[in-house]
């Protein structure tokens, strides 16, 4: 029986973080598509959710799994309370649930209905854990009490649906990004918009398009708060399968000026959905391929356009950094070959839904390169 990454980290001296030596650590399988995944604040659990409407929780050390009842529709976002007290999840009906995530099969502690008229696409939480931020199709950032779900404040101003929200390391500010590539800097105490930052490179609308394409899909800050990065898709070629150029933008937070545009070494036909700054200032990003073909987990120095290293894998929608700073987490899309319009009707006898693997990537040299860690389901 193979050892888990947790065991290896406990039984040896702490490894040195080296993104260029990234390798696959653990894999957790699931029969339906998962689009969001997070480490718990103590680093012992993984929570993931997506199209089967349930919340799946794995113990990182043992691989044991349990579920929370979930939502009435697809789950679009999730975030842990920073002190590990609660888990918040949002869905395509604008509903937010608060969970006692340590209790399997438990009912929500409280529920917020009407957070958005349609999809609530993004959640974030303040560093003190007191306030939950949400955003989505209503184009309004909303602030909620994490104690009881009471609404504290509306922050209007976006003209497109909100895809992403992140709280600045100072705990006093937040940023939100929308469909049209507008980033708003918010003062959380007053609720005022301090300024707009320009990420319009992540939006495309040609005359022949039937819809806007793109949006600020992710926002992340470095540990000092001096840099902010966001990502998505630029120069979309159509409004259907959306081929284009996956792109990340790096901003100087103090001036609001763009410092660098980060690209992928290989072409993908979807956005860079997720970014995370590592402790040494390296930026990690994961892209999506609509066809489910191989894409890459890429690593950049924020002042260099091209990645210095990449790791081939499946298409991914999310990325999270373990509290130890040595591991990344991503829910990956696994095509079962039965996709496409009408596939369910035409192939009733053999239609199989797309599935997922939730993978943990180790950001250090492989101590046992010849061994393989056992898959857990």
Image (cartoon, rainbow, N blue to C red):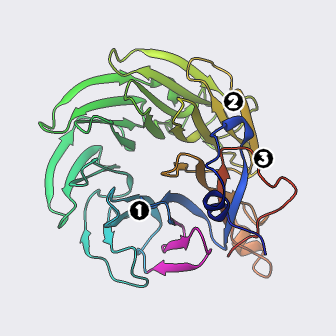
Local SS, label 2:
loop
| Quadrant in which residue 189 is drawn | top left
The residue lying at 14 percent from left, 62 percent from top is 150
The residue lying at 63 percent from left, 19 percent from top is 305
x and y percent of residue 29 in the render? 68, 70
For the residues marked 1 and 3, what is the alpha-carbon distance in whole angstroms? 28 Å
Discs 2, 3 touching: Cβ within 8 Å: no
* 104 displayed left or right of 85: right
Seen from the viewer's position, the closer of residues 44 and 79 is 44
> Which callout, 2 or 1, points at the residue further toward the start of the chain?
1
Instruction: Please name the residue that numbered disc 3 is placed on.
Output: 294
> What are the residue bounds of the magenta stretch?
46-68
Q: Which mark is residue 251?
A: none
Instruction: Please name the residue that numbered disc 1 is placed on.
Output: 92
For the residues marked 2 and 3, what is the alpha-carbon distance in whole angstroms? 13 Å
Q: Which mark is residue 264?
A: 2
Q: Say which of marks 2 and 1 sits in front.
A: 2
Q: Say which of marks 1 and 3 sits in front.
A: 3
Local packing at callout 2 (Cα closer than 10 Å; few below 14, some 14-19, many 20+) is: many
Asked whether residue 142 appears in the rendered view, the answer is yes
x and y percent of residue 227 in the render? 42, 25
């Amino acid at each position: 029986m193979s050892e888990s990454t947790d065991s290896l980290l406990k039984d040896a001296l702490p490894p040195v973080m080296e993104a260029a030596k990234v390798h696959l650590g653990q894999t957790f399988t699931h029969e339906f598509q998962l689009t969001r995944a997070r480490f718990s604040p103590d680093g012992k659990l993984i929570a993931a959710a997506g199209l089967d409407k349930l919340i799946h929780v794995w113990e990182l050390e043992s691989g044991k799994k349990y579920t929370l009842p979930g939502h009435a529709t697809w789950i679009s976002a999730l975030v842990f309370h920073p002190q590990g007290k609660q888990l918040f999840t949002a869905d395509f009906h604008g509903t937010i649930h608060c969970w006692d995530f340590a209790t399997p099969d438990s009912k929500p502690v409280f529920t917020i209905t009407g957070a958005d008229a349609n999809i609530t696409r993004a959640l974030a939480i303040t560093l003190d854990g007191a306030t939950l931020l949400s955003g989505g199709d209503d184009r309004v950032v909303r602030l909620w009490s994490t104690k009881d779900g009471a609404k504290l404040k509306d922050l209007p101003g976006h003209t497109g649906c909100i895809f992403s929200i992140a709280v600045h390391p100072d705990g006093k500010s937040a940023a939100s990004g929308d469909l049209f590539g507008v980033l708003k800097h918010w003062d959380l105490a007053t609720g005022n918009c301090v300024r707009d930052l320009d990420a319009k490179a992540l939006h495309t609308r040609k005359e022949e398009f039937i819809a806007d394409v793109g949006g600020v899909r992710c926002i992340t800050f470095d540990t000092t708060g001096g840099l902010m990065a966001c990502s998505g898709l630029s120069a979309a070629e159509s409004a259907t399968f959306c081929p284009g150029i996956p792109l990340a933008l790096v901003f100087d937070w103090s001036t609001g000026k763009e410092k660098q545009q980060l690209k992928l070494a290989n072409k993908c036909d979807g956005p860079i959905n997720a970014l995370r700054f590592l402790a040494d200032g390296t930026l990690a990003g994961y892209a999506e391929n609509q066809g489910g073909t191989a894409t890459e987990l890429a690593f950049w120095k924020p002042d260099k356009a091209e990645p210095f290293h990449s790791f081939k894998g499946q298409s991914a929608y999310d990325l999270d950094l373990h509290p130890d700073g040595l591991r990344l987490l991503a829910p990956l899309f696994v095509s079962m070959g039965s996709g496409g319009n009408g596939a369910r009707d035409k192939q009733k006898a053999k239609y199989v839904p797309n599935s997922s693997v939730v993978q943990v990537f180790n950001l250090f040299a492989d101590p046992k390169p010849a061994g393989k860690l056992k898959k857990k389901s």
